[in-house]
Amino acid sequence: MSVSLRIGIIGGGGWLGGAIAGSILDSGLVDARNLCLSYRSRQPDCFPDSFWTRDNQELTDRSDVVLLSVRPDDWHPLAVDASGKLVISVMAGIRLSALSERHKTGRVVRALPNAAAEVAKSYTPWIGASGITGDDRAMVRAIFETCGSEDEVARESDIDYLTGLAGSGPAFPALLAAAMMRHAVARGLPAEVARRAVNTVISGAGRLLERRNECPDNVVQTFLDYRGTTAAAIEGMRAAGFDAAVGEGLSAAFKKSVSMGAVS
Ligand SMILES: NC(=O)c1ccc[n+]([C@@H]2O[C@H](COP(=O)([O-])OP(=O)(O)OC[C@H]3O[C@@H](n4cnc5c(N)ncnc54)[C@H](OP(=O)(O)O)[C@@H]3O)[C@@H](O)[C@H]2O)c1
């Protein structure tokens, strides 16, 4: 992929836009001078060698690829003409057809990275409209590989589902960690020790899963077969409705994602 490529990130001053900008610069996919970022209220002081603007049409005109990374509500008033260009949205809920109509291009992609893009560990599912080319596909892969790993999915409804599972995903281990921490502190453990124990367990477990790359059910079964404290904990959590609670949460996220698209 050429470093002369020009990429523009609308909302580049935000959480996800900034994380993607950091990853594509760190990987060398794009040269800092060919990266354009837009902001709304205050120009961030990061990426000083890149071009910052408040004018999203100017950003689009200067770019070959435009990445949309504003909140869905802020996209509704965003009238940018990107005729003939590749537009990649990372916004939850906004449909390919709406993106294509609004930005006057058939080369549109919906992608769903997550907050782990900040540490180049995002999982990013994506889908393109029928107007995207083979080169566009390679470009989308190259961008999201700099942020972690990616998959092209077959149906737009898969993106709606994965918006909850993968897009919101980094929140779930944090939720588990918060519940573990509350329990430990209630049992009298000093907060500092509980925090270090819980955070290290969660990040270590992530590393282990990554290295083994096994089906999670097999990992759980290995712990169950050990028949020790871990099995007692897993059985207690399951009896209290752990699997059902996770299923309920993922279904709620899917419904929310679909409803966000319906109002676009
Ligand atoms: N964060 C995640 O983990 C995550 C995961 C998956 C998908 N997403 C999607 O990514 C998108 C961005 O999320 P985020 O978490 O990065 O939100 P965020 O931190 O609020 O960033 C959005 C940025 O867009 C800016 N903005 C709004 N309107 C603008 C405009 N007209 N021109 C230029 N900049 C504008 C905002 O500026 P102000 O400072 O003025 O508000 C803000 O800096 C959302 O659509 C979300 O659905 C996020």
Image: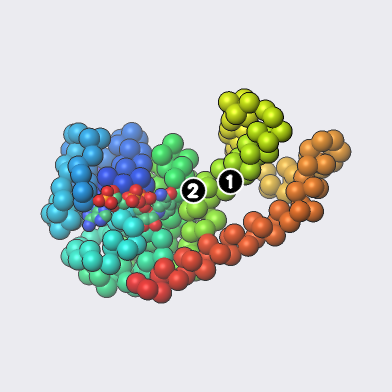
Mark 2: amino acid: Tyr
Q: CA distance from mark 2 to mark 1?
A: 19 Å
Q: Quadrant of the C terminus?
A: bottom left
Depicted 128 relative to depicted 10: above or below: below
Q: Is residue 51 visible?
A: yes
Q: Position of residue 25 (x, y in %)?
A: 30, 37
The residue at 28%/67% (across/down) is: 76
Marks 2 and 1: CB-CB under 8 Å? Answer: no
Crowd tier of the residue under label 1, counting other residues whose Cα lies within 10 Å: few below 14, some 14–19, many 20 or above? few
Mark 1: amino acid: Leu
Give the foreground label among 2 and 1. Answer: 1
Q: Is 119 positioned to the left or the right of 234 in the image?
A: left
First along the sequence among labels 2 and 1: 2
Q: Is 142 positioned to the left or the right of 188 in the image?
A: left
| Quarter of the figure with residue 100 | bottom left
| Quarter of the figure with residue 117 | top left
The residue at 36%/41% (across/down) is: 19
Q: Quadrant of the N terminus?
A: top left
- Identify the coloring: rainbow
Depicted 10 relative to depicted 182: above or below: below
Crowd tier of the residue under label 2, counting other residues whose Cα lies within 10 Å: few below 14, some 14–19, many 20 or above? many
Indicate which disc residue 123 carries. 2
The residue at 28%/63% (across/down) is: 75
| Quarter of the figure with residue 223 | top right
Depicted 257 relative to depicted 220: above or below: below
Q: Position of residue 102 (x, y in %)?
A: 25, 70
Q: Is 264 positioned to the left or the right of 80 in the image?
A: right
